[in-house]
Image (cartoon, rainbow, N blue to C red):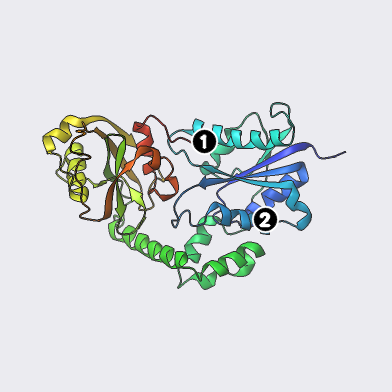
Amino acid sequence: MSTRKYQYAIVIGRFQPVHFGHQRLIEEGLRAADRVIVVVGSDRKPRSVKNPFTFDERERMVRACLRGTEQMRVSVVGVGDSPYNDQIWIASIQSAVDRLIQQDGHTPAEAKVALVGHLKDASSYYLKLFPHWEFVGQHSVESLNATDVRSLYFDPENRGQLARADLPDGTAAFLDQFTHTADYAELCEERAFLVDYRDKYRYAGSDFPPIYTTVDAIVVEAGHILLVQRKFHPGKGTWALPGGFVGQHERLQEAVIRELKEETRLKVPVPVLNGSMKASHVFDAPDRSQRGRTITHGFFFELAHNQWTGLSDVRADDDAAEVRWVPIAEFLGMQDRIYEDHYFIANHFLGGLGKN
């Protein structure tokens, strides 16, 4: 019979990549509970400097931190983001955990569950969102945090400052192998772009970094949504909503129609587009964009469809590599190929059909 206090210990994180702090939390979970459930966040996202590694790669790093005898006591599950609705994110984690508990033949409501974590700063607020699990707090561990690891790792000139001793052996070995991939080279290129971008547009000497204003068009016609493939960094190769930055002398709706026309050459007259605009919403998650604090305004256009002429003509132009009408059912399965938070922006207007 087990002498551990809990049946299950939950450890939540993005693990981008796994560092000693993560390892310490998992080890504490193994001491406290019969089984540990590691919840890997930001699942199903395209590679970026902020989220460079896939779920499978992060699971490999997590398991590389475990001794052989511990492997059978640890489950790793992926959960996607929901940046504009914490309740959806909470429910996704609860559902993933409950499924594993039920697979063991236990009733979730009766299971003794702990949430293991470290309240380091405001970014740890999520640890307070699960009051039905008993919180087991941990002190910080002397370790490079994941942000610092990524900053050094994707800067070829400074990567040498990242010693193997700074990371668990399994993570260090994985990162060594990953440097030889095309994905690593692409992420280094993206990081260089972002550093240059921030330096170029930062207000020198100001206590208030700039806040950018952008617009995005959600255009729907006959069960299809209009998407563009990004030609340049950041997010090169991912699919996005047509949109861009607001000009100095533009109103928001003028800007979104201009960007829509420039990127897609959509053959719909401007007055018709204005009349087809059904709703708008502000999307302001503080870390929604890698370029810096960027608030975007989404505009939903629903075009009347003429079945005899087919979908409205479009052609890629400006900074779009490709443009296409995508069936909404197909779009709902494209989360790992959609730029930044555009998947969630579109779903706000599509009735939440693609929520986790």
Q: Alpha-carbon neighbours of circle 1 within 10 Å: few (<14), some, or many (≥20)? A: many
Labelled disc at residue 222: none
26 w.r.t. 171: above or below:
above
Q: Is residue 141 visible?
A: no
The residue pinned by badge 2 equals 63
Instruction: Of the two numbered discs 2 and 1 on the same chain, state the one appearing first in sequence.
Output: 2
- What amino acid type is highlighted by mark number 2? Arg
Tag 2–tag 1 contact (CB < 8 Å): no
The quarter holding residue 300 reads: top left
The residue pinned by badge 1 equals 89
Farthest residue, direction front? 308
Q: Is residue 52 visible?
A: yes
Q: Measured from the top left, where is residue 4 in percent x and y?
A: 81, 40
Q: Secondary structure at mark 1?
A: helix
Q: Measured from the top left, where is residue 113 in percent x and y?
A: 71, 34
- What amino acid type is highlighted by mark number 1? Trp
Would residue 291 appear left or right of 15 to someone viewing this image? left
97 w.r.t. 196: above or below:
above
Report, in whole angstroms, how far the alpha carbon at label 2 lies from the one at label 1. Answer: 24 Å
Q: Secondary structure at mark 2?
A: helix
Q: Measured from the top left, where is residue 173 in percent x and y?
A: 62, 67
Q: For the point 75% across and 57% down, which residue is it? A: 67
Would residue 190 appear left or right of 221 to someone viewing this image? right
Q: Measured from the top left, where is residue 127 in percent x and y?
A: 59, 38
Q: Alpha-carbon neighbours of circle 2 within 10 Å: few (<14), some, or many (≥20)? A: some
